[in-house]
Image (cartoon, rainbow, N blue to C red):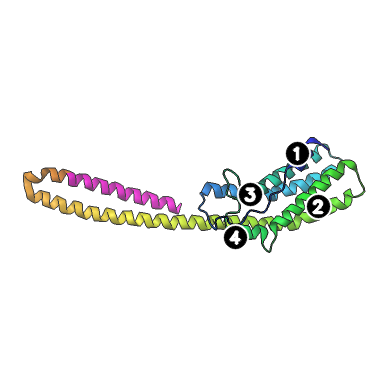
Amino acid sequence: MPQSLMTAHAERAPSRPQTGAPATLRLSGEVYGTLINLSGRRRFTSQRVVLYAVLAMQGRDGALALSAEALAVFRKAHAALVDGDDTLPGLYCDELRDAHFGATGADRVIRAFIELAERVLEAIPLRTRAVPDLLEQLVESATPLLAVLNRVTQVYEDLAKRQAATVKKQLAGVMGEIETIAKQARIVSFNAQVIAARAGDSGREFAVVSAELTQITGKLDGLVREAMRSSVA
């Protein structure tokens, strides 16, 4: 067996996540981007597995190794999404657990594809009679697999959009509170200026404090406007 195939075969398919995981988790936009990218990568690499397996059957040099490498990437991406790692949370919410282990059975379909691909890649160098049938099964499995992967990727994208909408709403709330405080501060500053003017020389230091407070509220207004523009972008 080629070294690349031995390496691919040695890697284990992801296991079902343990129960009792948090029902929800707040993730950053960067993490969501990684999750969506990995889920999308499964679609791309699954097609490469099939394509290069077909080319390997036709005797194309290097095609067998390329198919095995694509399968290893496919398996690794799926394991990272399901089991998580140091930077990824795994199936951190009920929607993702249901997408992989619920009625659609994405994990089952993905595992079946991995196992079938391994059998094909191991059989091709041996030129056994079963190779054409196995390869045909692999080709036929590509379309339903792609449909499953598309549905799962859509779940990640929907979760990311909801998270972004929630963060935007919370930011707007915080900015609204800051703006209210700034308005109140401006009123205090104006009243302080009036009192300082009436006090004459004795109110000079008070006027300096009032002017500084006016500058601060102006900066707050600028920060609020900038934050709101960023949240809309």
Left or right, 231 with reference to 106: left
How dense is the environment of label 4, judged by Cα within 10 Å: few (below 14), some, or many (20 and up)? some
Q: Is residue 229 magenta?
A: yes
Secondary structure beneath disc 3? helix
Q: Nearer the viewer, residue 223 or 88?
A: 88
Segment tinted magenta in the rendering: 209-233
Residue 95 tag number: 4
Q: Nearer the viewer, residue 56 or 107?
A: 107
Marks 3 and 1 close (CB-CB < 8 Å): no
Spatial separation of the CA atoms under disc 2 and disc 4: 29 Å
Secondary structure beneath disc 1? helix
Amino acid type, label 1: Thr
Q: Which residue is mark 1?
A: 7
Q: Which residue is mark 2?
A: 138
Amino acid type, label 3: Asp
Spatial separation of the CA atoms under disc 3 and disc 2: 25 Å
- Mark 3 or mark 1: which comes first in sequence? 1
Q: Quadrant of residue 86?
A: top right
